[in-house]
Image: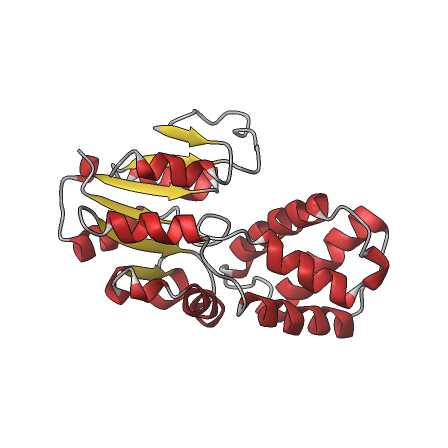
């Protein structure tokens, strides 16, 4: 029986593509008529790879990550060369767009209803300042206790490290791991990480990604539509 639910943040509790596309169209008006979903998916993939590298002792800095993820994605998709100045302009606009994100009304309602019977939390990888900007815009602290919101840089641990899930167990004050559920969109970091910590895990696979070759399907449930998350959460009420 599930007693507590922890969520990923990016592309789980809000559509990360929305602020990204808005920023791209403002900074690169020549792409305003383009279908930008493929660009966003590549940007996310490169971001994940570079973020993991940045955690290494000799890894790229945050500024280098910001430039490389955008320049590589734009060059691959549209053969566009991007200067560091344009990268900085995009990052400023992207940060501004992130202050405008919000929970969908249906998701906000179901989260509020879940608090009556479940303990809720968030475990998110990322830089503290950037993630706190998103959390503030989404007003999640009005629904989820601040002590149950774990940001990897802030706590010094990151998914898929089982210790960040164990830290959340302490925050939940629940030690029957089978009663804990994690929901996120990144298979390796979130699903495998949660399962290795003994949790149940739902793969929020609205990007329609494939499990990497050699990996075993260990998720307890796969959700393939963005709106499908609300439908599945309602079943828990």
Q: Is residue 114 above or below residue 218?
A: below
**Residue 54 position by quadrant:** bottom right
Residue 51, x across and y down, in percent: 54, 57
- Does the rendering let one see residue 163? no
Q: Give the side of residue 124 with respect to residue 63, left or right.
A: left
Q: Quadrant of the C terminus?
A: top left
Q: How is the rendered protein coloured? A: secondary structure
**Residue 108 position by quadrant:** bottom left
Residue at x 17% of width, y 46% of height: 117
Q: Give the side of residue 29 with respect to residue 88, left or right.
A: right
Residue 39, x across and y down, in percent: 71, 48
Residue at x 61% of width, y 50% of height: 44
Residue 214, x across and y down, in percent: 50, 25
Q: Is residue 79 above or below residue 155?
A: above
Q: Give the side of residue 227 with respect to residue 167, left or right.
A: right
Residue 61, x across and y down, in percent: 59, 68
């Amino acid at each position: 029986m599930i007693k507590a639910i922890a969520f990923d943040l990016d592309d789980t509790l809000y559509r990360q593509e929305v602020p990204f596309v808005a920023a791209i169209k403002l900074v690169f008006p020549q792409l305003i008529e383009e279908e930008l979903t493929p660009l966003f998916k590549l940007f996310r993939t490169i971001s994940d790879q570079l973020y993991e590298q940045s955690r290494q002792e000799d890894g790229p800095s945050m500024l280098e990550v910001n430039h490389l993820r955008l320049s590589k994605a734009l060059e691959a998709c549209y053969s566009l060369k991007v200067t560091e100045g344009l990268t900085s302009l995009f990052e400023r606009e992207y940060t501004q767009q992130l202050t405008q994100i919000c929970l969908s009304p249906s998701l906000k309602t179901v989260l509020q209803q879940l608090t009556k019977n479940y303990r809720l939390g968030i475990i998110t990888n990322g830089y503290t300042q950037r993630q706190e900007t998103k959390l503030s815009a989404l007003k999640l602290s009005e629904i989820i206790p601040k002590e149950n919101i774990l940001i990897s840089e802030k706590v010094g641990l990151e998914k898929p490290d089982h210790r960040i899930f164990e830290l959340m167990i302490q925050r939940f004050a629940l030690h029957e791991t089978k009663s804990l559920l994690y929901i996120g969109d990144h298979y390796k970091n979130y699903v495998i990480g949660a399962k290795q910590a003994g949790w149940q895990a739902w793969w929020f696979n609205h990007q329609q990604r494939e499990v990497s070759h050699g990996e075993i399907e260990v998720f307890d449930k796969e959700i393939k539509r963005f709106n499908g998350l609300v439908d599945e959460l309602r079943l828990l009420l």
